Image: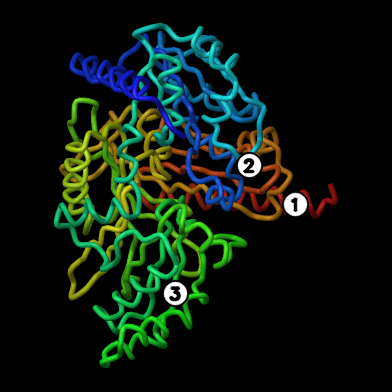
Amino acid sequence: MAISFEDKEHFRSLQNQLRNNWQKGDILEEDDQDILVIPSFSIDQEVGKKVIGFLHYEERLLFSLIRLRNPHTRLIYVTAQPLSPIIIDYYLQLLPGIPFSHARERLLLLTTYDSSQKALTQKILERPRLIKKIKDFLRPNKSYMVCFNSTVLEQELSVKLDIPLLASSPELLYWGSKGGSREIFAQCNILHPEGSPLVYSIENLSREISLLLTKKPYLKKVVIKLNEGFSGEGNAVLDVSGISGLFISDLSIEKKLNLVNQIIHEAKVQGLGETWLNFCSRIPELGVIVEEFIEGEIKFSPSMQGYITPNGEVEIISTHDQILGGEDGQIYLGCSFPAQEDYRLQLQELGLKIGLALAEKGAMERYSADFLAVKENNKWLLYAIEINLRKGGTTHPFMTLKFLTNGQYNCQDGLFYSPEEKVKYYIASDNLQKPQYHGLLPYDLMDIIAKHRLHFDSSTKTGTVFHLMGALSEFGKVGLTSIGNSWKEAQDIYNNVETVLDNETNDFILRGC
């Protein structure tokens, strides 16, 4: 989608307003603001539709409703399909010290009534009356827009509404891609897997695999990544153990390419129902890179999350150990907070370098970086894997913790402290999914939560907060963040929720209901 020069200039002026206002203080902490939340996953929709319940991932930003704890803040939340009223009630009743009715009056829920595969922001842009309704609600000079990720779609909506977008300009999207991430890591002298630049054909991909095996002839696997992906979808793992040893001999380029071409179709594409042929069809459009598969007997997948203010200041706000699944451990399932003590401060240090490099390019708001931690000779090596220049799977659990506890992250030790100086931990997942959960309505989940006291306890600041509740009925899938005063307590709370859901759904089936 093309955007005019005039609109680009208008967008820059709006973002400059944001930068100027930030000089007076953190607008995220200010009251008397109008916040437009556009939870659009404006990514390649062919990649997105491989994620089970993808449409309901718009619910991951519902933590934003907790901002209504500020008594003069107003908020608009737009979704593709209407949200169940009980889901909204659930979040508003989490607000500390604010009457439910007071918060509800300051919340405007809007929907496009469109469940097509288009990005939500595109759906909004196709509905001028909806845009007018949003614009009429917003107060000039007291409004800003937040989103999941920033593309030309969000840029266009920002211009049409004449409000600033608190996110990086779409012109910087490349630096959050697979190819752009590798360039940032190289610029920052950060350890990252040996790999290739971005290429756009299967022929050039084969050549890059051949070059990689020439450099590292004892590799067992390589990872092939589309330049745009989501939660590990868009990755493929190729077993090269049968040919890599031959690359130590003096083979011609043609023979090396022939060896690669004989096996490349055997790559295992990550994602339910995905095929190599379909994967290859996206290469000319999205581009692709190849990297060495990092091996290790002791290996974890940590990540860090940072924030770049509109005036260019960088702060580290969290570290996590990611929970990955799939046959080759490429699919994001959830996370635990904080990352292990052995390397969490090193993660912060590397993440700060990345944030400063992004800030120099003009990036703002949230970013994260994924790593692989491998223990060798009693030392942790951290390989940088990719940058996400957007909100991600670790954003909503951390912000839920922060808003509900009103605590603070401490960069000195990488821990989060409640106002009572208690350290907080959590286990979070977007993928608690089982066949017997299929058919559960949000109201059913609320009955179970109430019956077994699974809700978040504001007095102890422990318990579980649920999300993706709209995905339960159709997909048997729900998300949750279980908060405790220790890793064990957080894990026990999470395990108890799973046990209760299992027992409730199994008992219901056994009773023949």
Q: What is the secondary structure assignment of the residue under circle 2?
A: helix
Q: What is the secondary structure assignment of the residue under circle 3?
A: strand
314 sits to left or right of 268: left
CA separation in Å, label 1 and label 3: 43 Å
Q: Residues within 10 Å of mark 2 (few under 14, many from 20)?
A: many
Q: Nearer the viewer, residue 460 or 304?
A: 304
Q: Nearer the viewer, mark 1 or mark 3?
A: 3
Q: Nearer the viewer, mark 2 or mark 3?
A: 3
Query: Can you identify the residue that label 1 sits on?
Result: 507
Q: Position of residue 494 (x, y in %)?
A: 50, 49
CA separation in Å, label 2 and label 1: 21 Å
CA separation in Å, label 2 and label 3: 32 Å
183 sits to left or right of 42: left
- Name which residue type carries label 2: Ala
Q: What is the secondary structure assignment of the residue under circle 1?
A: helix
Q: Residue at x 33, y 59 (%)?
A: 198
Q: Nearer the viewer, mark 2 or mark 1?
A: 2
Q: Does 161 sit above or below residue 242? A: above
Q: Position of residue 195 (x, y in %)?
A: 29, 67
497 sits to left or right of 138: right
Query: Can you identify the residue that label 2 sits on?
Result: 471
Mark found first going from the N terminus, 1 or 3? 3
- Name which residue type carries label 1: Asp
Q: Position of residue 18 (x, y in %)?
A: 28, 19
- Looking at the rendered structure, which numbered label has been put on residue 238? 3
The residue furthest bottom is 249
Q: Position of residue 83 (x, y in %)?
A: 63, 28
Q: Residues within 10 Å of mark 1 (few under 14, many from 20)?
A: few
Residue 247, image quadrant: bottom left
Q: Does 191 sit above or below residue 104? A: below
